[in-house]
């Protein structure tokens, strides 16, 4: 594929969608340690289930507005009236099960924060604080274990495939392809590793 800027990217980055290219270039695979961003991505990944990430990404701003800036304390307090309002919101994915899961997951997220000091500390403990490089997988023993633990804690829409995509999105796993300009082996200096 020919890119106008001369950079080669992962096969899934749609060259016709600037938002998608920016996401690939500046977010995907970049280690995240900020709880607000980790929660946002957790919610968005759960809504992706059965859909394309591009579909979710295109609705990201609408999600941000509908879900109070991804504030877990506000979301965990949503009642039936708010859930019905969201289910009627044309800008987001109007799946009641996923909306209810977001409410429940927000409460569990806050419980994990209290237990571990931050959700970041909890999440990065699964990889020993390291960035892992893996390609061509849809799940792994790590995503299996994380999914199992989150389900045990009461989260839903956090199956192993969703969790693997989440780990890739927040940089615990770097899956940029070997021919991509962001491949960690090709450009070691641009990809931070380990915990900050």
Image (tube, grey):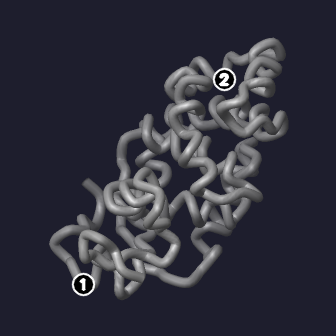
Which circle's residue, 1 or 2, is located before the other in the chain? 2
Of tags 1 and 2, the one toward the viewer is: 1
Vertically, is 21 above or below 157?
Answer: below
- Residue sitting at x 50%, y 25%: 69
Residue at the far left in the pictured view:
189
> On residue 76, which mark appears?
2
Q: Position of residue 124 (x, y in %)?
A: 43, 57
Vertical side of 156 occupied by 176: above or below = below
Q: Which of 21 and 96 is in front in this view?
A: 21
Q: Nearer the viewer, residue 89 or 183?
A: 89
Residue 144 image point, x, y percent: 67, 68
Q: In which quarter of the image is residue 22?
A: bottom left
- The residue lying toward the viewer, choosing from 134 and 24, is 24
Q: Is mark 2 on a helix, strand or loop?
A: helix
Q: Which residue is drawn at 42% across and 46% down?
A: 120
- Work out whether residue 141 can be spotted: yes
Q: Mark 1 points at which residue?
A: 186
In the image, taking residue 171 as reference, residue 162 lies left or right, namely right
Q: Position of residue 101 (x, y in %)?
A: 75, 37
Give the residue drawn at x 47%, y 80%. 134
Left or right of residue 156: residue 167? left
Distance between the alpha carbons at the discs numbered 1 and 2 = 42 Å
Asked which secondary structure carries label 1, the reply is loop
Who's the residue at 20% across and 77% down the image? 188
User: Crowding at label 1, few (<14), some or many (≥20) Cα neighbours within 10 Å?
Assistant: some
Point out the image quarter for the N terminus.
Answer: bottom left
Do residues under tags 1 and 2 come within 8 Å of each other at their CB atoms? Answer: no
Residue 26: give its label: none
């Amino acid at each position: 594929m020919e890119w106008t800027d001369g950079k080669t990217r992962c096969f899934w980055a749609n060259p016709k969608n600037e938002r998608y290219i920016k996401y690939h270039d500046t977010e995907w695979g970049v280690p995240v340690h900020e709880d607000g961003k980790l929660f946002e991505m957790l919610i968005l990944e759960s809504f992706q289930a059965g859909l394309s990430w591009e579909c979710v990404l295109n609705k990201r701003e609408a999600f941000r507005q509908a879900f109070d800036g991804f504030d877990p304390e506000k979301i965990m307090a949503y009642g039936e009236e708010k859930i019905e309002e969201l289910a009627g919101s044309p800008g987001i994915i109007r799946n009641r099960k996923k909306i209810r899961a977001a409410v429940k997951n927000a409460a569990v997220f806050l419980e994990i924060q209290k237990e571990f000091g931050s959700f970041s500390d909890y999440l990065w403990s699964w990889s020993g604080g390291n960035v892992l490089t893996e390609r061509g997988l849809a799940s792994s023993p790590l995503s299996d274990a994380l999914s199992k633990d989150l389900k045990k804690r009461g989260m839903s829409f956090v199956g192993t495939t969703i969790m693997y995509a989440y780990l890739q999105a927040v940089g615990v796993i770097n899956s940029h392809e070997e021919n991509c300009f962001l491949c960690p082996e090709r450009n070691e200096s641009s990809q931070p590793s380990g915990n900050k």
